[in-house]
Amino acid sequence: MARGTGLVRWLAAAALVSAAAATPVLAQTTLKMAYALSETSHYGVAAAAFSKSLAASDPDFKIQQFPNSQLGGEREVIEGLQLGTIDMAIVSTGATLNFVPQTGVFDIPFLFRDLAHAHPTVHGGLLDPPEGVGLADLQLGHQHPLGAIDRLTGLEPVAQVA
C-alpha cells in the first residue's frame, strides 16, 4: 500500500509541476519589427513613435526594432511576416508588389489630388491582402502637417500618402 501511495504522490507532484509550467508567465510580449533603413530615417522615427505609443497604451507589449535590413531586405522581411518569424515591418510599396499587386497603384505619380481624394481608396478595401498570401493586414502611413512648412519660401504644403 505504501508503494501505491508513493506513486500517487509522485503523480500528483508531476501534475502540479506540469500545471505550473503550463501557466502563462506574466511578462512582456516582445514583437520583432524590421525595416530597411536606419533608426534616424523616417522609418526609424515612425518605428520609435509607434513603440513609444504602444508602451504607453499597453505595457505588456514591447517592440524590438531591427533597422538597417538586419533581418533581410524588404522581400525577405515580408517573407518573414508570412512565416511568422517577424511580427511587424515597415516596407515600401515596391516590395509589396510581388505579394499584393494592388499596391502598385500607389507608385503612380500624382494619382491623388490630396489626402481627401486618397482616403476612400486607401481605406476602401483596396489594400486587403488576397486569401492565401499570409499577411494579416496592410496599412499605409499618413504624414501629418508640420505646421511650419508654410514658412518655407516658394513651397506649398504637399499632401502625400506614404
Image (spheres, helix red, strand yellow):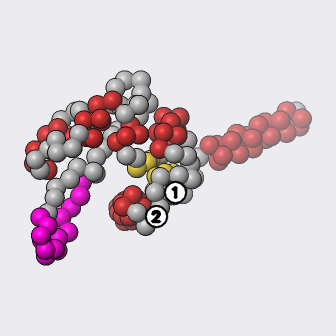
The answer, for residue 81, to whether it is visible in the render is no
The answer to whether mark 1 and mark 2 are in CB contact below 8 A is yes
**55 or 32, which is in the foreground?**
32
Relative to residue 84, is residue 136 drawn left or right?
Answer: left
**Residue found 80% across the figure and 40% down from its top:** 10
Q: Dot 1, how many residues are within 10 Å of its Cα: few (below 14), some (14-19), or many (20+)? A: some
In the depicted structure, whether residue 63 falls above or below residue 10: below
| Dot 1: element | loop
Query: Which residues make up the magenta segment?
Result: 142-156
Q: Earlier in the sequence, mark 1 or mark 2?
A: 2
**Rendering coords of residue 149 (x, y %):** 17, 70
**148 or 136, which is in the foreground?**
148
Residue position marked by numbered label 1 in the rendering:
68
Amino acid type indicated by mark 2: Glu
- Residue 1 forms part of the magenta stretch: no
Residue 39: image tag: 2
